[in-house]
């Protein structure tokens, strides 16, 4: 392979790597910054700032929940309307200290607002 082609190949590889780094250049938050920025915010605000999560899950009541907990779980008299709960997961977004980053951040969203935030390394 000629020297000219090697140089051109090197330039394309270097540009590809630099564009990849720029594309993944999302902001890293400290724990307190993240809690202040997203605690009790709407899911639209979270989507606007963080974009789509890596993974989403919906909370559902198991069909055999009554037998597991040993008491009826049916609708009680005067019970409020059905609650929509989602869990959104983002990866490598929050620093646990100066050197380390939490592998996963979980946002629990209830009826369109962030209700709970968790940071995990072992999931």
Image (cartoon, helix red, strand yellow):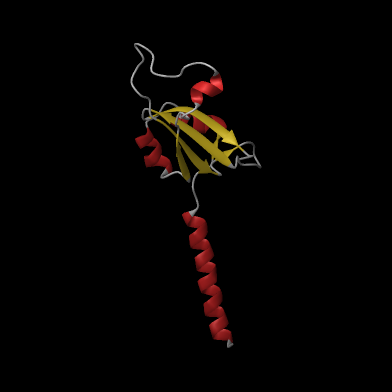
Question: Could you tell whether 98 is left or right of 23 in the image?
Answer: right
Residue occupying the point 51% across, 72% down: 12
User: Height in image: 48 above or below 67?
Assistant: below
Residue 94 in the image: x percent, y percent?
56, 38
Residue 46 in the image: x percent, y percent?
40, 37
Residue occupying the point 51% across, 30% down: 117
User: Height in image: 107 above or below 26?
Assistant: above
- Which of these two is toward me, 48 or 25? 48
**What is the count of numbered marks?**
0
Residue occupying the point 54% across, 83% down: 5
Quarter of the figure that contains the N terminus: bottom right
User: Height in image: 2 above or below 35?
Assistant: below
Residue occupying the point 54% across, 85% down: 4
Residue 123 in the image: x percent, y percent?
61, 40
- Which of these two is toward me, 65 or 58? 65
Residue 97 in the image: x percent, y percent?
64, 36
Residue found at the far top of this picture: 77
- Which of these two is toward me, 92 or 81? 81
In terms of image quadrants, where is residue 73? top left
Residue found at the far bottom of this picture: 2
- Which of these two is toward me, 45 or 33? 45
């Amino acid at each position: 392979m000629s020297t000219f082609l090697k140089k051109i190949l090197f330039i394309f590889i270097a540009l590809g790597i630099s564009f990849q780094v720029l594309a993944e250049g999302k902001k890293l938050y400290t724990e307190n910054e993240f809690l202040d920025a997203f605690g009790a915010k709407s899911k639209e605000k979270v989507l606007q700032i963080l974009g789509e999560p890596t993974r989403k899950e919906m909370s559902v009541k198991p069909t055999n929940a009554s037998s597991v907990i040993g008491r009826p779980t049916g609708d009680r008299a005067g019970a409020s309307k059905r609650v929509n709960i989602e869990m959104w997961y983002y990866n490598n977004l929050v620093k646990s200290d100066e050197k380390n980053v939490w592998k996963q951040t979980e946002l629990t969203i209830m009826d369109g607002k962030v209700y709970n935030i968790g940071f995990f390394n072992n999931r």
